[in-house]
Image (cartoon, rainbow, N blue to C red):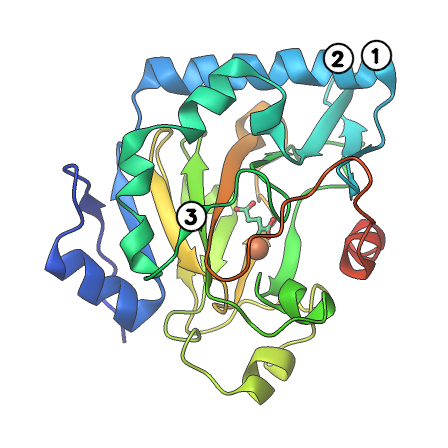
Amino acid sequence: MLSYQTFRFNGRLTSEQKAFFDLNGFIHFKHFINADAVQRIIHASQEVERQWIEKEVQKINGVPVKYGTDLDGRRIVQRFAFINLHHPILKEFSLDPRLQELLPLVGEGARLGTHEKDGMVFNHYINGPQSKFTQMGWHTDGLRDIFQGGRLNPMLNVGVHLSSLTTENGGLRLLPGTHKQSMYQLLFRKKYFLSHDTDPNEIAIIPEAGDLTVHDGRLWHRVAKSGIVGETSRRRVIYLPIIAGKYMPKNEDSPTLFYQRFAGIIK
Ligand SMILES: O=C(O)CCC(=O)C(=O)O
Ligand SMILES: [Fe+2]
């Protein structure tokens, strides 16, 4: 059984950090950005939200924007794609040189997916009477590559956590070590997006605002529903992929992929 451990990022990955990541398929760094940066990023997302609501933006580069309802009944954006291309603060964050130092976790030819896949994704969860986006069933992020007809290219997801949570909040749950599994297990360990069971081997990521996580694209994970209702259930998190393999940028003409339609239907 894994003893859960967090790390500090001091400008370069240490061999201990790399070894932990290779073994478990994830790593959690405390205090990657400070409280001021967290606030600026949240504020930037609210500016983008205002524009997208006003223009009724449905898709960004083929990726559906997910809308929902806040506690006060206001319309909000709950899942932004490519948000780094829509605000200078978020673009600036994607250029933080420390993020480049995470690339060796994938290996040769790795890059940040600022213009590929879903770009920088911003998720905003809230658990209230009108909420629909409160959890996410078990999945791996790598399956998307299979849906795209390609082979499974190495891919990691860098998470920047913008809310401080307790275990009661729910949030990210991971199955350590499942990045080293057979194709069969990658496809069928759980029912994609439908299973919400608490797995005896799952690890709860309990971040403070400003923490950073990295998880392997083949690792099984889910988002547990908050046991708390109302304002303290609010959870914001950014994901930016690290990608290797062929460069496949998206643009406004990019098609909506099958799994993206599917993701909209399954709660
Ligand atoms: O919100 C999270 O922490 C995880 C979201 C996730 O797994 C995804 O969008 O693929
Ligand atoms: Fe995911």
Residue 34 image point, x, y percent: 29, 21
Residue 155 image point, x, y percent: 48, 60
Residue 4 image point, x, y percent: 25, 60
Pick whichever, 227 or 184, lies toward us. 184
Q: Report helix, strand or loop for mark 2.
A: helix
- Please report the residue visible at 56 percent of the width from the left and 37 percent of the height from the top: 120
Q: Are marks 2 and 3 in contact (CB under 8 Å)?
A: no
Q: Horizontally, is 45 left or right of 148 in the view? A: left
Number of dots carrying numbers? 3
Pick whichever, 207 or 15, lies toward us. 15
Image height of 19 relative to 111, above or below? below
Amino acid at dot 3: Arg
Per the image, the residue denoted by label 2 is 51
Badge 1: few (under 14), some or many (20 or more) residues near its Cα, within 10 Å?
few
Distance CA(mark 2)–CA(mark 3): 29 Å
Residue 259 image point, x, y percent: 77, 60
Q: Horizontally, is 196 left or right of 218 in the view? A: right
Pick whichever, 96 or 226, lies toward us. 96
Q: Identify the mark at residue 111; answer none if there is no mark.
A: 3
Image height of 222 relative to 122, above or below? below
- Please report the residue visible at 40 percent of the width from the left and 79 percent of the height from the top: 180
Q: Are marks 1 and 2 in contact (CB under 8 Å)?
A: yes
Amino acid at dot 1: Glu
- Please report the residue visible at 57 percent of the width from the left and 44 percent of the height from the top: 227
Badge 2: few (under 14), some or many (20 or more) residues near its Cα, within 10 Å?
few
Badge 3: few (under 14), some or many (20 or more) residues near its Cα, within 10 Å?
many
Image height of 158 relative to 42, above or below? below
Q: Are marks 3 and 1 in contact (CB under 8 Å)?
A: no
In the figure, residue 10 lies in which quadrant?
top left
Quarter of the image with the N terminus in it: bottom left
Distance CA(mark 3)–CA(mark 1): 33 Å
Per the image, the residue denoted by label 1 is 54
